[in-house]
Amino acid sequence: MRPSFFHHLHPPTIPAKQARFRYTLAAGGLAVFLVLVLFVTGILEVFYYIPTPGDAALSVQTLTFLVPFGGLIRNLHYWAAQFLVLVSVVHLARVIFTGAYLPPRRFNYLLGMGLFVLAVLLDFTGYVLRWDEGIRWALVAGTNLIKSIPLIGTALYGSLVGGAEPGPATLIRFYGWHIFGLMLAAGILVVWHIFRIRRDGGIAVPPPALRETQLRISRFELVRRELLAMLLASVALLLLSVIAPAPLAQPITAGSALPANVRAPWFFLWVQELLKLGSPFLWGVVVPLAVLTLITLIPYILPKPAVSEQGHWFPKSSLLAQILAGFIFLALIILSLLALIPAF
């Protein structure tokens, strides 16, 4: 069979053991697929969305209830965005727990962290674009964290929201960042990340002499597996979009206060829980940035995984990195669950 363009995006062959689902979890390929779903559904949504405070929530309702298949498109966009953040976390955990950041892959690890941050920011800005009562925490409490930064906080807050408080300028700026700024940066990093995967030798594996088996699979088999994973993901997304509509609430009214029971988006619930401990700057800015920085610097400040242990889960040579990452992930999960307790 003659390779197609999509086949040429993959190496001719890869080790069969490291191509198994229980090693890769298909997280990287699913992330790329979800980005494509978001891109297509986002383009369709743009035709109906109106980025003004008076019309934003109403245009979302119009798209959801009056446009043929509009509700399905919006639901697909919403769930693809949530799963992109979740799949990105799984992919990050897989890289750390398999020690797959050994040089020359350290730089690509940084690119991946940049993509993860952009995915969260895209989800956050898209969340705010609903401009209804359900996004009040993100709009008010979330942006107020910027104001808590000493010396430069007020200036940064004004640049972000376009004034002394959220208003029409805030929505148009979030819209601009979501559609142009963040999407452009994410597109560049996605291409760069994929290019570096090929340039760095593909998936992390031990040297040939240290491999348990020399069995390899062709790019044709790899593409077949990826298409099967995309098909299964498409079915799951469609089913979820049909049975679980994306959140929708009443439009924000002028002068309304922040409700007492409002919650952050699920990926920031842990930050909301931390804010109960005291200083917004310390717990809402410093600690989250410290966690992000610590995870980003794992390949640079902790012992390198042994080359002979590449391509395996939980290499002993990178045990410290696994303990650190495991503690951080567990802490974030516990904090997120604690933030949900008052809702029951």
Image (tube, helix red, strand yellow):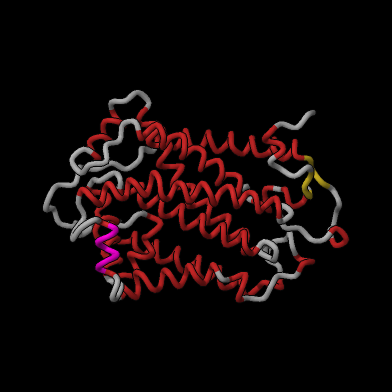
- In the shown orientation, is residue 170 left or right of residue 85? left
Please report the residue visible at 71 percent of the width from the left and 36 percent of the height from the top: 7
Give the quarter of the image for residue 64. Answer: top left
Residue 331's x, y, as percent?
A: 46, 69
Residue 226's x, y, as percent?
A: 65, 39
Q: Is residue 163 above or below residue 233?
A: below
* Quadrant holding the N terminus: top right
- In the shown orientation, is residue 46 left or right of residue 234? left
Q: Is residue 257 among what the camera can see?
A: yes
Residue 195's x, y, as percent?
A: 65, 49
Region of the chain picked out in magenta, as a range: 154-160
Residue 144's x, y, as percent?
A: 26, 64
Give the quarter of the image for residue 152. Answer: bottom left
Residue nearest the viewer, comparing 225 with 179? 179
Q: What kind of secondary structure does the magenta stretch mostly adopt? A: helix
Residue 156 shown in magenta: yes
